[in-house]
Image (cartoon, rainbow, N blue to C red):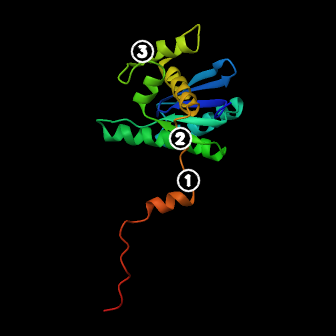
Amino acid sequence: MLGPTRVLGIDPGSRVVGWGVVERTRTGLQHVAHGVLRLDVSAPLELRLVELFARLSETLLRHAPTAVAVEGVFTFKNARSALVLGQARGVALLVAARAGLPVFEYAPALVKRAVGAGGAGAKEAVARAISAFLALTDTPRADATDALAVAVCHLHRAGSPFQGRRPRRSGPDLTDRLRPAVIRPARSGA
């Protein structure tokens, strides 16, 4: 079998976070579980992030994935919304990193195409496509179907011989990439 056998897909948000677990079996891809984490919208953002960390950690422990796939950030008209979403995504990445799991990110258009909903497909199209693809009897909430689609996207990409399966990198390689392009010599005393 190629790649990971069980993937936790995450559709991050600061109020609602969708998650879905899909497993590769000998007969194809199989739905394992899915859900939606609703965070207390009346709570300050930092407390919602703590709650998100705890609940995603529980989900990860319960379903024991071998990889985590997260939907990437897309263009926002509102910078504050993008920043808040980035913080929720950061929590999802932290949960996976603390568990020692590789993390993969996919652009929303790529995720939609992976399940046959087209690059510009609406959430309803993704929900219909993922429900049919995984033979779900009830269509889950859009946030959960988006997360399942992220997991399916990863399993398709990880199973392709043409796809380089490189997770997000951390550690020393990251510091090399963050080095300034020009290093100026230190000034000596005047």
Q: Is residue 27 left or right of residue 155?
A: right
Q: Which mark is residue 164?
A: 2
Q: Earlier in the sequence, mark 2 or mark 3?
A: 3
Quadrant assignment, res 27: top right
- According to the image, label 3 marks what residue? 125
**Residue sticking out furthest to the front:** 161
Name the residue rendered at 54%, 39% in the picture.
104
- According to the image, label 1 marks what residue? 170
Name the residue rendered at 65%, 32% in the picture.
2
Whether residue 139 is situated above or below residue 166 in the rendered picture = above
Q: Earlier in the sequence, mark 1 or mark 2?
A: 2
Whether residue 142 is situated above or below residue 161 in the rendered picture = above
Could you tell me the amino acid type at mark 3? Ala
How many dots with numbers?
Answer: 3
Name the residue rendered at 43%, 24% in the picture.
113
Could you tell me the amino acid type at mark 2? Gly
Label 3 – label 1 distance at C-alpha: 35 Å
The N terminus - image quarter: top right
